[in-house]
Amino acid sequence: MSTITISILSIGLLAIAEHCMAQQRHTSDALIPVAEFGKHRPIGVSVSSTNRLFVSFPYQGKDHRYSLTEIIDGKPQPYPDVAWNTYAGDSATRFVNVQDLYVDTEDYLWVLDSKPAPKGSIFGGQGSEAAEGAFKLLKINLANDRVERVYTFEDIDRKTAGLNDMRIDTEKKLAYLSDPGRAAIVVLDLASGTSRTVLSNQPSTTADPDVVLSYDGKEMRDGNGNPFRSNVNGIALTKDNRYFYFKPINKLNLYRIETRYLADASLTDAELAQHVEDMGKTTVTHGLIADNKGNIYLTSSMDYSIKYLSPDGRLHTLVRDSRLIWPDSFGIGSDGYLYVSCAQLQRDPAWNNGQDNVEYPYRVYKVRLPQ
């Protein structure tokens, strides 16, 4: 059987699974609601070593409230303060569009504030060809809740970049970011503030056009019939900083590379590509995270589940629940739980002929990690 046939078969099985879920809703007691946000869509999620929970929200115009919050007693509070969450004034000292969060192994909170230009956005959109994106990465000290440094990515192409997710390598003092806009990985030197763009338009970073997302028996297409498509998006860094995992949303294969190769600025893309490992077929995935046992967790939206790849290479289902509507980002708490946001992106009017099918309120959930 050819590789293409296997890929199409895998997609078909996923479509059948999600269609069955649509026909009969399934609720698991293992999936526990943590906080709800009305019409405010949660995206980024991260948890500190003391189990402080942080959730971010992209800018939503009139429905926008806060960009970055700490969840205290189940309620979102602006973080690190109200000023950073004010959508007015100098963009250098306020959030524009918070996309991703990550608490590193030294317990610093990193915040990716990313507003791609239309050409770099996974959502496309009409706009001036000259439009530029706005990007910054913040390092926040959780001991005193202060912003210690801001990186501004002056050396990337702002017309085409679409920085999406990031992970921090505290050993090598590097940040790794997915850039679906350019189908690439960005490596940021945290000492100098300069960045490199690597693995551009490689098979491991590029969406598969044959993978079309389908939910409730309906393909995810916009009003012009164009399918949703994203190049490299979800990423994960193992706790020992050895392996960096990544994959496009529109691809079933999961990939990894040793970070020592990403850190080597002398390697060309062709040489780097030789060190990329194909971990095999997984699922349509939006977010990834690694735990301290070496498990790699993957959101699996087409069958409303969370899966994980164990160190022995086997793929397991942690939980399946019809409330997992576009599970997006993960955080791992010191309490033994995996936290996940549900963005419900496929329910948006843009993909449903102008009809809003979102099931409000938006929520963040948790599920216990495997023993």
Image: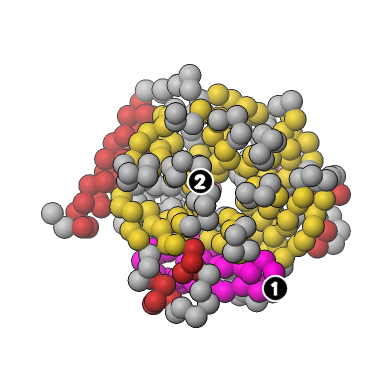
* Label 1 neighbour load within 10 Å: few <14, some 14-19, many 20+: few
- Specify whether residue 194 is painted magenta: yes
Residue extending farthest left: 1
Q: Which residues are magenta?
A: 179-206
Question: What residue sits 39% from the left and 47% below the top?
Answer: 284
Residue 12 location (% of width, % of height): 26, 44
Above or below 320: residue 187:
below
| Residue 32: mark in rendering | none
Above or below 357: residue 32:
above
Q: Secondary structure at mark 2?
A: strand
Taking the image as shown, residue 240 lies to the left or right of residue 364, namely left
The quarter of the picture where residue 304 lies is: top left
- Specify whether residue 87 is painted magenta: no
Residue type marked 2: Ile
Question: What residue sits 69% from the left and 57% below the top?
Answer: 113
Question: What residue sits 73% from the left and 45% below the top?
Answer: 68
Measured Cα–Cα span from mark 2 to mark 1? 27 Å
Residue 275 location (% of width, % of height): 37, 68
Residue 219 location (% of width, % of height): 38, 45
Taking the image as shown, residue 262 lies to the left or right of residue 316, namely right
| Residue 289: mark in rendering | 2
Query: Majority secondary structure of the magenta segment?
Result: loop
Q: Nearer the viewer, residue 333 or 75?
A: 333
User: Does the image show residue 310?
Assistant: yes
Q: Which residue lies under the disc numbered 1?
A: 192
Residue type marked 1: Ser
Give the mark count: 2
Q: Secondary structure at mark 1?
A: loop
Residue 144 location (% of width, % of height): 83, 46
